[in-house]
Amino acid sequence: MPRIGLLTSGGDCQALNATMRGIVKTIYNKCHEPVEFYGFEDGYQGLIYGRYRQMTAKDFSGILTRGGTILGTSRTPFKYLDQPEADGVEKVPAMIKTYKKLKLDCLFVLGGNGSLKTANRLSQEGLHVIGLPKTIDNDTWGTDMTFGFTSAVEVATQCIDDIHTTASSHGRVFVIEIMGHKVGWIPLYAGIAGGADVILIPEIPYDMKNIIKTIDRRMETGSRFTILAVAEGAISKEDAKLSKKEYKKKVAARTSPSIVYDIAKEIEAKTGRETRVAIPGHTQRGGAPDAQDRIFATQCGVEAALGCLKGEYGYMIAQIEDKMTRVPLADIAGKLKYVDPKSDLVREARALGISFGDE
Ligand code: F6P
């Protein structure tokens, strides 16, 4: 009887359940013998400590539209994989032990970069692992798309839409912080979809004087407000010149909780315009998946299950140029997918008059 393990790891997103449903439904439909499903609780924590639930296909039914993850998640272990947990438990041997004790035939790991790095390590240790590209940030190398991304773009866009009315009523500048970790995919997409005037992303360092110029120009031409969609990882040209260590030190010394407060303060001081901050925060990871995410998550789940049924392991399911494909886990571990500042989308946004603060 095939024995299948599933875990969801790292920051949650809207389409984790939809993906698991895709995996389990496909195995249930295509496998000609009964299957045992094991759902590990709170990501790799469950695998390390043997915390799991024996589940049936029915447990994964009715969850297509449900955000979050029915298994729970955590950010362990990612970093310091070879260092023991606080209680002395060695992570990798403990995970292998649980896998072997349950006699699993395959472990599905739904996770982002850190989680997939761990998945690669487990695969190198001889476990049968299949990775699925989860993250709202869309920064997973080797795939054009990750599930969670389009739903997060939708929420961030809604936020920019809503800010428009209050910004215009008060004639204010609004600095909206948008998630994305070290990359600018969500702010770029949401900024364009929501009609932001300025988009700041880590891949294109900004100069404050260009932002001020854009705001002044808008005021001169009769626009009462300006909206900035700012990546949480946005960086100034000046800071981009610092070494990694110096920059980390500077960020640690910041008194405000986010760069958006510093940006807003400087704009208000230099333009004399009332400036406010808005932070949609974790709402970008919450709620139901949008239609596109439901479809992509389902595709990922189906492809992963079909691969497993063929006895093929050691890769992440990916989508490249609209085709579903696979990338070896070893190829993606430790890499990030950044926005290309020369991409068509950035070029088109510039043509539209959106400023990236670099010129
Ligand atoms: O990776 C997803 C993400 O939401 C990032 O966009 C953000 O930087 C981070 O997770 C927030 O993490 P946490 O939920 O641990 O605060």
Image (cartoon, grey):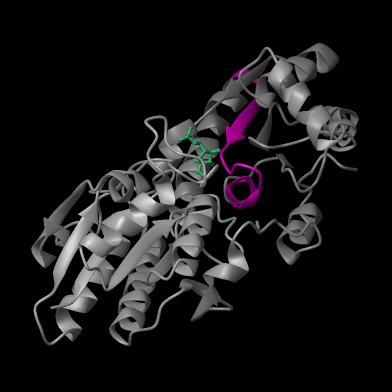
Looking at the picture, how far across and down is residue 236, in whole percent? 82, 33
Residue at 38%, 60% in the rendered image: 109
Looking at the picture, how far across and down is residue 280, in whole percent? 49, 32
Q: In the picture shown, does residue 304 fall above or below 133?
A: below
Rendering quarter of residue 251: top right
* Quadrant including the N terminus: bottom left
Rendering quarter of residue 142: bottom right
Looking at the picture, how far across and down is residue 299, in whole percent? 37, 74
Q: Tell me: 292 left or right of 51.
A: right
Is residue 62 inside the magenta stretch? no
Q: Is residue 171 visible?
A: yes
Is residue 175 inside the magenta stretch? yes
Residue at 69%, 56% in the rendered image: 338
Residue at 61%, 27% in the rendered image: 168
Q: In the picture shown, does residue 310 fall above or below 84?
A: below
Q: In the picture shown, does residue 342 fall above or below 29?
A: above
Looking at the picture, how far across and down is residue 171, in whole percent? 66, 21
**Front residue (pair 232, 349):** 232
- Residues drawn in magenta: 170-192
Q: Is residue 142 visible?
A: no
Q: Tell me: 56 left or right of 51.
A: left
Q: Tell me: 127 left or right of 79.
A: left
* Quadrant including the C terminus: top right
**Front residue (pair 279, 316):** 316
